[in-house]
Image (tube, rainbow, N blue to C red):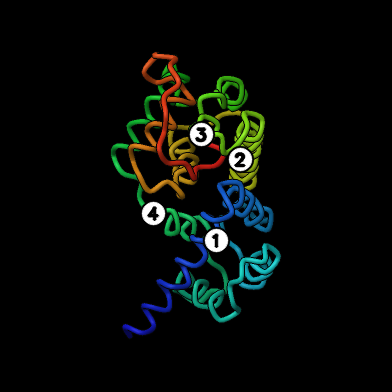
Amino acid sequence: RSQVKQLIINSLNKLKNTFILRGTHSIFSFIRKLSLYDLNHKGLISFDDFSMIIQTYTMNISPDEIKIIFDLFDKEKTGTINYNELIQTIVGQINSQRQLAIQKVYDRFNKDNNGKVSINEIKLLFNSRRHPDVINGKKTEGEIFGEFLDNVENYREYLEHLKGVYETNFSLEDFINFYSLVGMGIDDDNIFEFMMNNCWNLDNSNIVGKSNKSNIGGA
């Protein structure tokens, strides 16, 4: 039993590390692809589709590892899994420090307290110039901004296919989930908070600081 458990952990970690190494765009592209095969908008995907998508992304995940991951979530042996449960397991639970930083950004947009923020407004107000990867010279403003737009659009399409309606707004839950995905490759909570502060000017300082770590990708 312990050996099987270790195989499951190793397979999930391998999948997660693949996303981290490839950058945030890879996880957003992946969940969008999963949702495209969810024709009934129920959040479910079959083994054949799941296996095909992973192989299409050339993730270096073996057929046995794909089966191990799938079987973990197909507890009732229906031949389908809830891909949202898979993503949540890979991402993990976001902690209070990160959630507070995300909430602060969301509250700035949600001024009328209607529980929705405009996706277009989010795109317009994101400040790629102050992103840590730009400050450290790892990427250009254009690269970070382009990644951010792609991530938002992939996530919007994922929500659209999941809910069956065209999305023009993010709920708080949507926004938290979005930044949970962004934060997958950021181990340090302070670096995550630094990114949120700089890209959204949370402290109203409008001062570009220096980050001593950077492996973040499009925030």
Viewer-nearest residue: 20 or 80? 20
Of the numbered discs 1 and 2, the one sitting upstream in the chain is 1
Amino acid under label 4? Gly
- Give me the C-alpha separation between circle 1 and circle 3: 24 Å
Q: Residue at x 35, y 44 (%)?
A: 188
Amino acid at pointer 2 = Asn
Q: Amino acid at mark 3?
A: Asn
Q: Position of residue 96 (x, y in %)?
A: 28, 39
- How far is mark 1 from mark 2, CA to CA? 17 Å
Q: Amino acid at mark 1?
A: Thr
Find residue 10 and report its horizontal and vertical position in percent: 43, 73
7 is higher (above) or lower (below) than 94: below
Residue under label 2 = 151
Pointer 2 or 4: first along the chain: 4
Left or right of 143 on screen, residue 136: left
Badge 1 element:
helix
In this rendering, which labeled residue sits more in front, label 3 or label 4?
A: 3
For discs 1 and 3, the disc positioned in front in the rendered view: 3
Q: Earlier in the sequence, mark 3 or mark 2?
A: 3
Where is mark 4, residue-wise? Answer: 92
Residue for badge 1: 18
Q: Which residue is mark 3?
A: 136
Circles 1 and 2 in contact, beta carbons < 8 Å: no
Is the C-beta separation of discs 2 and 4 under 8 Å? no
